[in-house]
Image (tube, rainbow, N blue to C red):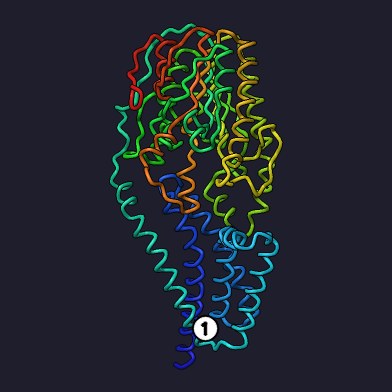
Amino acid sequence: MKQVTKNKYFNRKHLIAIAAIAIVVLFPIAHLYFRNLTLVNPSEVLITALLFFALGLAIFGATWLLLGNSSKAAILTSISMLSIMLFRPIENRLTAFIPILYYWHIVYLLLSMIILVAIVLHLKVKNELAQTFTRVIAAIFGVLVLTNVIMAAPKIITELSKEKVNQSMTIEPQSTISSGDNVYLLIFDEYGGYDGLLRYANFDNSSFYEELENMGFSVAPYSRSDTISTNIEIPNLLNLSQSLTNDNYRLAARTEILEHPMLLSLFKQNDYFVNVIDDQNFLAPSEDLVDQIFIAQDDLAKVETFQLVTIKRSVFYPFFTAKEHDRADEIDMLFDELGKAADIHDSHVLTVSYMMTPHKPWVFDQNGNQISISERENWRNPNIYIGQLQYTSSRILETVNKIIRKDPNAIIVILSDHGYRLPMHLEAFLDEEIDNRALEADYQRNILNAVYYQGKEFEIGDLSGLNTLIKVVNTHFSMSIPFVGAGD
């Protein structure tokens, strides 16, 4: 009987140790997930958690062999996993106080700390006390995870209570006749409008607008979008309606709309060849609506996924941010592909392009030279963003000039989904407070908005991006889709 009791105790102790590691690993992931609840697919969170938990188990196994006690191994593994998963925030705090510290200095410091803890655990801490510490770790981080869930509860309840997006909000394609001229919709993520750039970066972008006007574009430098969310604005643009709002947004609804958006259906119904140029596989339309699609990266090479964001907060970040050298090539590749769009056919081609630039990661300076990896997400310095914006502007001008020379009867709509969201990111990542949310939201919704309509005058005033696109489609197809939201 004594032997059976000992075995039960032995197994239970190991389970507590493994549970403590699992909860510790879950904490940073839960913290990040619940702050971005509506933007992340839960399956991606699960995969990320399992990857880090597998790493934790590997470290646990090694330290158990080293220390000979599962509770001590769990304590050391917990410290190791927190150091690994939260390395970037730790590094940022340390370098803020001691600027001469670099990545490998901090790796050495943390590794030395972990070795010191291992020695203390082995020589000074009794097994019974180690087991108590393990339970305390599990309890503390369990409370922290639960706190994140409780703080996110209102948002979770709101998400669960949302009804499915009302399909009557979308517009069914109609039988129409158009000129057959080629149409280009070019969307650039986070390209700020005139007011927003002046406010947040003290940058006057009027020369860019002047060059567009010299090419025959109508421009709306003071245009506003209805939202600062890419996941809301782009589906609405492609669906020619305000199908999604902050109140009804769901990831599944966004995916459903992007699979069969009104814009692509309408042009396809009118015998257009549909050409999609897609960054990050963000658009992902159904195959039956697309004749040709170009995607710059596969699933593992995307620059914005929950898994990659989590890894880039960890000790492994240099090995993944280094891959952003490929990001510069991708952006150039996307522009090169867009420049070829006018060569597809003489007429009846719709080209829809989404590029995640000048959105971070910022990889270019204004001349197209790659910048330091350490500056690629530096929200403190707006000049980093402006450098990529200027390079993006030069590529836009080069590309549309090429299209117009080849295709003077083209219709070209250049939009951004939202403006430069400096206050939002300073609040989210650097704990700065926004004094006047309504005011700053207005500036962050200031977007790029310009239309070339076969070189003719095309008045867009200060219409929102969505209403500008609706007006273009109405004119092209002699339709009467109603304006919505801002600028209606």
The foreground one among 279 and 444 is: 444
Residue at the image point whose x is 46% and y is 93% from the top: 2
Residue at the image point whose x is 58% and y is 75% from the top: 76
Q: Is residue 220 above or below residue 150?
A: above
The foreground one among 447 and 231 is: 447
The foreground one among 370 and 257 is: 370
Q: Which residue is mark 1?
A: 130
Secondary element at image label 1: helix
Numbered circles on residues, count: 1
Specify few, some or many for label 1: CA neighbours under 10 Å numbering under 14, 14-19, or 20 or more.
some
In this rendering, does residue 445 appear at all?
yes
| Coordinates of residue 363 in the picture (x, y in percent) | 65, 40
Quarter where residue 206 is shown: top right
Residue at the image point whose x is 51% and y is 78% from the top: 14
User: In the rendered view of the protein, which quadrant contains the N terminus?
Assistant: bottom left
Residue 414 placement, left or right of 327? left
| Coordinates of residue 414 in the picture (x, y in percent) | 52, 22
Residue 316 placement, left or right of 221? right
